[in-house]
Amino acid sequence: MKGPLIYYEIKNMYGTDLSSTKLATELRKNVEEDIELNFNVEIDFKGVRSVTNGWARNLIGKFIKDNGIDTFKDHVLLTNMNKNVKTNILEASNS
């Protein structure tokens, strides 16, 4: 991943337990806009305890469906996920 980076610290933005699909959609749209402006995006889950399947689907699953897995791999970096968060994110990326 080369180029400028936009950093999202999820805990500070949305808290430690994520369930609002509206907020996930808002974040996804911001990420898509950043990528259109030729930025890469790091989404840091440090301190996040849980995400619901719906939250993960609205952020990751819909992003991949609309933009493709290659765009996701080339421009989005997910960091500091605990086991629960990682499991739900992986499930969402496959749906």
Image (cartoon, rainbow, N blue to C red):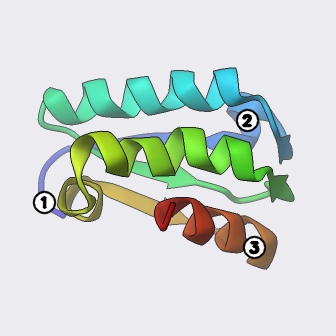
Q: Residues within 10 Å of mark 1 (few under 14, many from 20)?
A: few
The image shows residue 34, relative to residue 53, as above or below, that is: above
Q: Inspect the image, locate mark 3, and give the three-letter code of the amino acid beneath it.
A: Asn
Q: Looking at the rendered structure, which numbered label has been put on residue 12? A: 2
Q: Residue furthest bottom?
A: 83
- Asked whether 20 or 8 is in front, the reply is 20
- The picture quadrant where one finds residue 1 is bottom left
Q: Residues within 10 Å of mark 3 (few under 14, many from 20)?
A: some
- The picture quadrant where one finds residue 25 is top right
Q: CA distance from mark 2 to mark 1?
A: 26 Å
Q: Residues within 10 Å of mark 2 (few under 14, many from 20)?
A: few
- Asked whether 53 or 49 is in front, the reply is 53
Percent x, y for residue 81?
Answer: 67, 69
Percent x, y for residue 47?
Answer: 80, 57
Residue hosting label 3: 82
- Asked whether 90 or 79 is in front, the reply is 90
Residue at screen point 40% across, 24% down: 30
Task: Identify the mark nearer the N-term, 2 or 1.
Answer: 1
Residue at screen point 75% across, 31% down: 14
Q: CA distance from mark 3 to mark 1?
A: 26 Å
- Asked whether 91 or 34 is in front, the reply is 91
Q: Inspect the image, locate mark 2, and give the three-letter code of the amino acid beneath it.
A: Asn
Q: Looking at the rendered structure, which numbered label has been put on residue 2? A: 1
Q: Is residue 5 left or right of residue 82?
A: left
Task: Identify the mark nearer the N-term, 3 or 1.
Answer: 1
The image shows residue 23, relative to residue 70, as above or below, that is: above
Q: Are marks 3 and 1 in contact (CB under 8 Å)?
A: no
Residue at screen point 44% across, 42% down: 62
Percent x, y for residue 51?
Answer: 78, 52
